Amino acid sequence: MKNFLKMLLASVLGVFIVFMIVFFMLLLSVNFSEPVIVKNNSILKISLDKPLVDRAGMPSINLSSLSIESNMGLNHILFGIERAKYDPRIKGIYLELSSIDAGIASVEEIRNALTSFKQSGKYVLAYAEYYSQKAYYLATIADKIYLNPFGSVDFRGISSEITFFKGLLDKLGIDVQIIRHGKFKSAIEPLILNSASEESKAQIMEYMGSIWNFILQTISEARDINPEDLNKTADNIELTFAEDAMNKNFVDKLLYEDEVLAELRKYSGGTALNTVDISKYYVRPVSTDTKSDKIALVYASGEIISGEGETDIMSKNMVSVIRAARNDSTVKAVVFRVNSPGGSAAASEIIARELELTKQTKPVVISMGDLAASGGYWISAPSHKIFAHHTTITGSIGVFMMLPDFGKAAKDKLGITFDVVKTNEHADFPSVTRPLKPAEKDYLQKSVEYVYSKFIDKVATFRNISAEKADSIGQGRVWSGVNALDIGLIDYFGGIAEAVEEAARLADISDYTLLELPRELSTFEMILKSIETKVSGSANSELSATLKHYEYLMSSLKNYGMMAKLPYEITIE
């Protein structure tokens, strides 16, 4: 046994030493600031083939292949396009597209940046073997749209599919007890209904219709195709073949990739084709002057959760970041980038309070991303101005609570029963092993009504409208950016760039540095986090499409607190 323990210890030590050697070899081999050489007559290449996030962090390490994997953020693309606009070495931009793993508002923001880029007199070209609807919407900003002769354009309108779990919960004997305010607050419908309510269908059709009409109008203006003809094409799914897209003026030429590259050589004005990928061209804006005026760009992406941690919008982390920006005398304004479906009402209020305090000392401008709804709107309200895109999902001003009852399921399915000894009538409240008593349900309903009234008061106060109007556009209803501007929930259409410009105007500064917050992880922290992510997330990566429904169900059942959250996941192909 003694020799066995020695051998085991030696083996473990040997593995650890080898791991550390490989770890530090990787660490030494990584150069995150290696400059890219941009030749004259170059073309900036943008491929949106990876999941897009608002703000990409440091590259990650793939432990299975011992390679460096870079990620792409919307900030990379926007700053890169802006830099290319004034770079004399860059003659144009080449969009290599197919499907895009990004929200439609993010795509709109990229398209707006490309519109600004073209105002410099430079060109944009697009090519794909197949265009998804989002990819084609982005491609319509190009001077020329190329399609592979064996490709196609997906153009059939947008839809929303909701998964309902009531039948499953009934089979399992699980009862979900709901307390809510807002006839449109349909976050709980998948757990208590077998299909969407009429109110839910009405709001979905309202915001989807406004988004689709905006997309149609944009494509119509870019391609000179009547909106009625575009709808007819979608209704009859007429773009079966590449020739159909060509004949209906959706694309300019049917070309193979080698022919597209030949076209690019012509546009670049040289015999050699010099392309530079935007992920390498992007230069991180870094301030070396600690005394210069700054605008803090604070990113808030994910679900709003109480506490602290490295994922989503954790209230303690976010409060710390906002407070530091407020107390920094060199920070003259704050731009708060919100991309969130909401979450905990308490956490939302904690973050909103910190922004309210900041607003009293310096300008606070909100930039809404793909969605800033429910709790996402709660943390956006205490600001001087709110920017969103036409296709942003926002509103959903409502509150709900849910408490599952597993008692019947445990007894009928597992033979498990529960008994409680208590000093007072409601000492075991809340419990997930019995139904709510009338007094308990009344207590929770009063709590929901109170939190909803506070939500409405904030919207009314910060948007300078009456409480009655705030309630009329609240009730948990979801709005598109187009609707939100009409009813006063936002101030302007625009993205990060426009929000930063407005913040500078309000702060009365013209020369400033953009300070992105929260701070990015150090190389060492990034590698450790990469290891943790790879180890914890590798097992289920192949099942993500199926697991999202399971994850939604589990997330819903475990959220017992007061929630201000978007009703469902919204995607546009």
Image (spheres, rainbow, N blue to C red):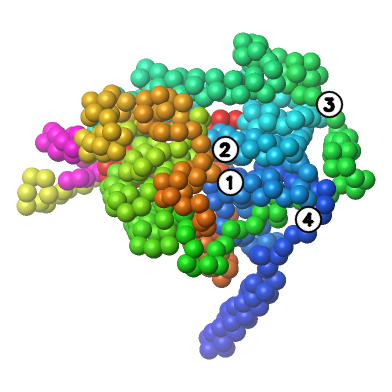
Q: Which residue is mark 4?
A: 38
Identify which residue is drawn at 73% across, 21% down: 250
Query: Which circle, 1 or 2, is nearer the viewer?
Result: 2
Crowd rating for badge 1 (residues with CA inside 10 Å; few <14, some 14–19, many 20+): some
* Quadrant of the snapshot with the C terminus: top right
Q: CA distance from mark 2 to mark 4?
A: 25 Å
| Amino acid type, label 4 | Val
Q: Which residue is mark 3?
A: 254
Q: CA distance from mark 4 to mark 3?
A: 30 Å
Q: Position of residue 258 (x, y in %)?
A: 88, 38
Q: Which residue is mark 1?
A: 74
Query: Which circle, 4 or 3, is nearer the viewer?
Result: 4
Identify which residue is drawn at 49% across, 63% down: 292
Q: Which residue is mark 2?
A: 109
In the rendered image of this protein, does residue 25 appear above or below residue 135? below
Crowd rating for badge 3 (residues with CA inside 10 Å; few <14, some 14–19, many 20+): many
- Marks 3 and 4: in contact by CB < 8 Å? no
Q: Is residue 44 left or right of residue 263?
A: left
Crowd rating for badge 2 (residues with CA inside 10 Å; few <14, some 14–19, many 20+): many
Q: Earlier in the sequence, mark 2 or mark 3?
A: 2
Q: Earlier in the sequence, mark 3 or mark 1?
A: 1
Q: Secondary structure at mark 3?
A: strand
Residue segment shown in magenta:
429-450
Q: Position of residue 8 (x, y in %)?
A: 57, 81
